[in-house]
Amino acid sequence: MNKLLLITGSPAPFRIKWCEELSKYYDVLVLYTKKEDSECNTKWLKKESEKCDLKYRKISDLLRNGDLFKLLNFYKNSIVIFDGYGILVNFIGIMYMKICVRKKFFVNIDGWQCGVREKFLIKFIKKILFKGKYFFLVSGDPTKENLMGYGILENRIYVHNLSPLHSNEMLSQILTNNDKLRLKKELEIKESRVVLCVSRFIELKRIEDLLYSKKYLDDDIAIVIIGGKKTEAYNSIIEKDNLKGIYFLDFMQFDDLQKYYMASDIFVLPSRTEVWGLVINEAMSFGLPVIATTNCVAAKSMVKNDWNGNVIEPYDVKALAYQINRILNDNNMLTKMSVNSLKVAKEYTIENMAAIHKRIFDIYIKEINNEI
C-alpha cells in the first residue's frame, strides 16, 4: 500500500475524517504539532483515530534533531501533503522539499481571509514560497482564483469540495414544518421560527450584527446562537434595544448540535471574513437556507442567491434582516431553498472529497514509479 504523510497544526476533526477515508487506499500518517488551538475549542479537536496513524510532535522537537528532514526524505517517493503553509514546520518543510529533496508534493489550502488586505511583505513571501513544481489542493473555485493571483498556473491547482461530513451524517430529505415545531418545543424555544448561528464569539464573526438585526425581525422569529458564553458586549446590545427571543448556548459537539440544526429554519453566518466556514456545510446538510457575507469563502462556493440562500455585504444589518424576513415569510421560497441546500450539501461529502484526491494521487504515484 502506498504511503501518505500529512503534516498539520491542530487535529481538526474534519481533517482526520478525510484522512481516515483516505486510509482505505493508503497507509496514512497524520503528524500534528498542536494539542491546543486558540482559534477553536480544544474539545472539538480529534486526537485519536483507529483508522489512520495519528501522532503528535512538538515543532521544536521536529526541528532540533533534523527529524523533519529525515521524515520528508523517508516519504520522498510517497504522497506528502502540507496542510497549509502558515505554521513554521510547514513553511520550512515546503522550502526543504523545493530546494533539497526536489520531489513534487502537495499543499492543502482550505480558503483564505477574504476581504482582508494583505501586507506587501506577506504577499512577497508567499510569491517566493509558491514558486515551484508542487501542487495545491484547494477548496472551491474562489480559493483557486485567489491562488492564481500569485502567478500560480492553473495546472498546479486541484479543486475539491471541502466537507466536514460523511454522507450518512446528512438528512435524506428536509423535515416537515410539524417536525420542526415538535423539535422547537422539545428544545424549549417558544417562537415558531428560528434563525440559527453557530460560531465562536469573537469580533470577526460579527455576532453583534445578527443581534442588531433582531429589532427589524418579526416578533415570532427567535435567534439561537451557539458557541460560547454570552459576553457583556452582547448583553449590552440586548438590554439597550430590549431584544426578546434570543437564546445563547455554549459550545456543542456536532452530535448535540444536530437537533438545533433540524429545529431551525434558516442559518446565518455574518462574519466579516471567513477562511471557509464549515458550519455552512453542516447547516446545508440539514436543509437550511444560508445567509452569509461576501467575505465567507464557503458561501461564495456553495450559496447561490435566491436559490438556496443569499450572500450579502458584511456589516449590512438591514440587508441581513430583510433577507431573513423575506425568506421566512415566503413558505414556497423557504421550501425551495431548503431542498436546494440539501442538494448542494450532498455534493460536499468526505467520501466525494477523498475520491477526488484518490484520482489525483493515483496519477501522481504512477509518475513517481516511472521516475524510480
Image (cartoon, grey):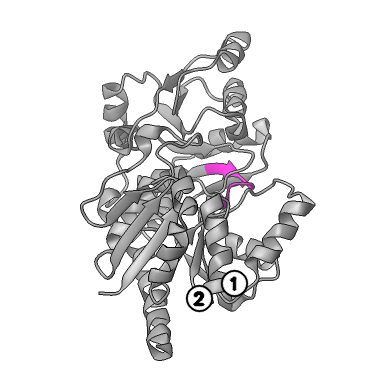
Residue drawn where x is 56% and y is 58% of the image: 92
Give the CA distance from mark 2 to mark 1: 11 Å
Q: Indicate which disc residue 104 carries.
A: 2
Residue 189: x %, y % from top left:
36, 21
Q: Name the spot of residue 235 as percent of width and height, x first.
A: 55, 13
Residue beneath the point at 59% across and 60% down:
143
Q: Which region of the structure is painted magenta? A: 291-297
Callout 1 crowding tier (Cα within 10 Å): few <14, some 14–19, many ≥20: few
Closer-to-camera residue (361/177): 361
The part of the image, by quadrant, that contains residue 43 is: top left
Residue 330 visible to an observer of this rendering: yes
**Please, what is the three-letter code of the amino acid marked with disc 1?**
Ile
The residue nearer to you, when weighing 21 against 219, is 21
Q: Which residue is mark 1?
A: 99
Give the residue type that dot 2 points to: Lys
Mark 1 or mark 2, which is nearer the start of the sequence? 1
Query: Which quarter of the rendering shows the C terminus?
Result: bottom left
Please tell me whether mark 1 sits on a helix, a strand or a loop. Answer: helix
Where in the figure is residue 4, as x and y percent of width and height?
A: 35, 67
Query: Can you say whether 28 is above or below 182 in the image?
Result: below
Image point (43%, 86%), residue name:
367
Q: Give the structural element (helix, strand or loop) at label 2.
A: loop
Mark 2 or mark 1, whichever is nearer to me:
1
